[in-house]
Amino acid sequence: MVESLAQPARSMSATVAVLPHELIFNAFLAVTALRYFVVTGPASQPPYLYLALLAVSGLTFWLDRCASTPVTWRVRLGWYVLAMSIVFNYMRGTIGAIAGPAQDDALLAADIALFGTSPTVWFQAIEARPLGEILSFCYVLFFPYLYGSLIARLCGERGTTERFFAGLFSLYGFGFLLYSLVPALGPSLGEPQLFAAPIANGPVARWVLDIVLAGSNGADVFPSLHIAVTLYILLFDRRASPRRFAVALVPASLLMLATLYLRFHYGVDIIAGVLLALGMLALSRVRLRLSHH
């Protein structure tokens, strides 16, 4: 049965509350481990990392189920911050092992069908070093915006925190799965012929580009999680934290614009990111209850 998160919690002795991301993110872990086993066989070590993450997820749920306290529910939710970070950094090897070739040509073809060209090309007409510096700075704000939001929510009350985590880590579960199904490098690396010349970068832009190239897992293009995560947090805060929303609106909007200006994403990546954010925002308002006997 699906119920609103805003409803009063029932006795934990009578029911087990399962949040959507506990199904979706862990389903991604299980599917990825299975794909690994199919491709590399049971003697391969990497799939056991995904199974270990899956086991810890179950353990944090069980601990909160046995004795729900402010500590146990925060550990249960906060675990996914660490799991997400581990998975993202580990996916470079995963993509190389279980995914096919880069799909940049297919993504570019989709852009051409929808827009006539990839929208990132349009920004060549307004490229300027000062603009690039501003947008590059806003782009890298993604990390403090994400982790700052996670910390702020974990310090808040349970109901809002559960809704926030339920949508956000469901988003990551779907996003990581799509990374592994549609690997791509992005327009700058995958389709450089689109551009007449490299962007004239200043020191901030060059620094950001170094960070992106060093931190990329080699497939983090479709969907754009910079778009999906930023838009999700922004829209969640519009109701839950209006002041935070007002402060973040302009830099977050510039952050999302930077994904195209800096040539990191195709137009279809942006569309997919927006749809993913909106879908997971809707999902964040429900939770699943499984009867316990």
Image (tube, rainbow, N blue to C red):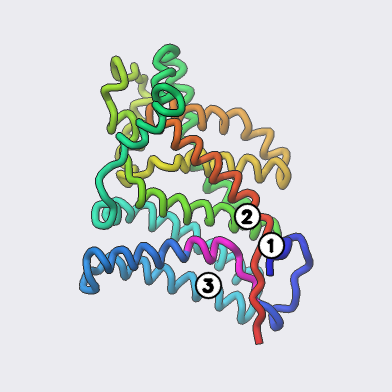
Residue 211, x across and y down, in percent:
35, 37
Q: Residue at x 53, y 27 (%)?
A: 254
- Picture layout, residue 221 above or below residue 112: below
Q: Can residue 15 be seen by looking at this rendering?
A: yes
Amino acid of disc 1: Arg
Q: Secondary structure at mark 3?
A: helix
Q: Residue at x 39, y 26 (%)?
A: 112
Amino acid of disc 3: Thr
What range of the chain is rendered magenta?
16-25
Q: Residue at x 27, y 25 (%)?
A: 192
Q: Earlier in the sequence, mark 2 or mark 3?
A: 3
Q: Secondary structure at mark 1?
A: helix
Q: Nearer the viewer, residue 253 or 187?
A: 187
How packed is label 2: few (under 14 Cα within 10 Å), some, or many (20 or more)? many
Q: Secondary structure at mark 2?
A: helix
User: What mark, if any, has residue 283 been given in the picture?
Assistant: 2
Amino acid of disc 2: Leu
Residue mark closest to the camera, 2 vs 3: 2
Residue 6, x across and y down, in percent:
76, 60
Q: Quadrant of residue 238?
A: top right
How many labels, in total? 3
Give how far apart the Cα atoms at labels 2 and 3 are: 22 Å
Looking at the image, the residue that sits furthest to the front is 113
Q: Earlier in the sequence, mark 1 or mark 2?
A: 1
What residue is pinned by disc 3?
60
Quarter occupied by the N terminus: bottom right
Residue 18 lies in magenta, yes or no? yes
